[in-house]
Amino acid sequence: MAEGDIFILSDPYVAGGNHLPDWTIIKPVFIDGILEGFAANRAHQSDIGGGAAGTYNPEATEIFHEGIRLPVMKLVERDKLRKDLWQLLLLNSRTPELLEGDLGAMLGSVNIGAERMLRVMKEDLGNGRGIDYLEGLLDYGEMRLRGEIAKLPDGSWHGEDGSDTDCFVDVDVPVRVKATVAGDDLIFDFTGSAPQVKGFKNSSLANTHSAVYVAVAAFFDASIPRNGGTFRPVCIIAPEGTVVNALPPAPMTMNTIYPATEIVYACWKALAQVLPPSACAGWGKSAYGISSGRKADGRAFVMYHWHATPAGGAVNGRDGYAQGGNLPSLGGRTMPNVETYERLYPCRIHKHELRRDSAGPGEYRGGSSVNYEAQILLPSTHAVRAEGLKRTSGYGVLGGGAGAKGSIVMQEEGGLPQRPPQYIIQRVGPMRVWIEGTAGGGWGDPKKRDPMRVLRDVRDEIVSVQSARDLYGVVIDHTGRNIDVAATKALRGG
């Protein structure tokens, strides 16, 4: 490494990546010729070649089907861009114009990050002790999490979640964990999880670590910093050859969602037995796909049906997100603007509205997710990735109910409506797709929910008048706008 170098990597087997579409740009930071740290940006790319546009190939049975594999390479050497490597990267994408812009932004971000790190370490503190300051932040994160773990009783608890498909056939794919508290250490042992599967839902070791850290970060005190030091007390045992630590050439593009979600769920279910008030209800698993093809001008398009993403599960004190992307983002997904989508892609979006009576009931209810209808105006390839179709996934906790599962219906022009399998690539003509997004689970006894919250949900058409009565014990009067207080008290037992 030298000053002015910038590296790129993606491969999960030889470069520490989580899956191939996430490219990582890393710039070493030097002070007086001594390596002191790194500025890094990991970002998902729109397309990296492989057997399906948009990076997700449900038909993949080897990592070679999923796109270009990047070991650790110098993209910039002593401040000079390697144009040969740059061209190689662009040639392996169906959307090189998007990739080029994104890579340029990533390079700019690590340059700015490196500059700001140097400013903190050399200038802002003024005493040459910037490294000590950064190390202190890491040590503080470790101290805070160790303090939370130490409050728990020593012992072991088990959690399990899983999938019902390997992307090709129906089969149970369990993710099992034994969570052990030993003093101020927390150990997650995934021994007993399923062997790696045929399809692209295998986890790399880096991805499994990330999923466990998401589970821990979401479960414990939200004021604890989220940095590398925070997770020093966490030990992860992930046996090789399993779905949580696959061996090559297993495919794994889908791993940042599945089995990452199952890993988080298994950890949450184990931890909830130790500290029930902090239990997290399950989020809905995905039920949507990607449409890709060529526009009239010949340029490729890759349209993710983000508007149909699932809803979040409830926690103590807060309802689940109505819609927020898949679980590993913890609600970080911003729903795209419908009008912008219709300008970018050959589509018309006819419906994007919240579902009714889908949210898992509870003192704090799950998110409802949406009803979505879109029309794709040109022939396209549609890659379905719909884990949440066959069984409910947004489980409830502490008496809360489960959120509704999802559904997908597709219809080509002149054809009959069809329900696709959970994972498939279909070459279709102009078509319509109807999706019911999967809903989140509830937290706590629904009969303890604030009646005014129930009334608001009825007014917002998230909960029906009948469900308000049957699930929550709240009676809404004939106007549908007010609570019948006497009837509610009688139904709730005073």
Image (tube, rainbow, N blue to C red):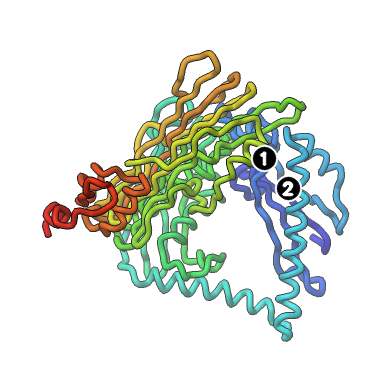
10 Å neighbourhood of mark 2: few (<14), some, or many (≥20)? some
Q: Answer with left or right where residue 444 lies relative to residue 292.
A: left
Point 49% across, 49% down: residue: 324
Residue 131: image tag: none
Tell me if label 1 and label 2 are in contact, CB under 8 Å: yes
Q: Answer with left or right where residue 191 lies relative to residue 38.
A: left
Percent across and percent down for residue 52 are 63, 29
* Disc 1 element: loop
Q: Is residue 380 above or below residue 109?
A: above
Percent across and percent down for residue 157 are 31, 56
Point 71% across, 43% down: residue: 70
Q: Is residue 220 above or below residue 204?
A: below
Q: CA distance from mark 1 to mark 2?
A: 9 Å
Q: How many numbered discs?
A: 2
Q: Residue flagged by tag 1: what amino acid is it?
A: Ser
Point 72% across, 80% down: residue: 124
As drawn, which residue projects farthest toward the front?
479
Residue 46: image tag: 1
Can you say which quadrant of the picture contains the N terminus? bottom right
Residue that numbered label 2 is attached to = 102
Q: Nearer the viewer, residue 35 or 390?
A: 390
Point 32% across, 46% down: residue: 360
* Disc 2 element: helix
Residue 157 visible (yes or no): no
Q: Residue flagged by tag 2: what amino acid is it?
A: Asp
Can you say which quadrant of the picture contains the C terminus? bottom left
Q: Nearer the viewer, residue 101 or 218?
A: 101
Q: Is residue 73 above or below residue 151?
A: above
Percent across and percent down for residue 126 are 73, 85
Q: Earlier in the sequence, mark 1 or mark 2?
A: 1
Q: Is residue 232 above or below residue 190?
A: below
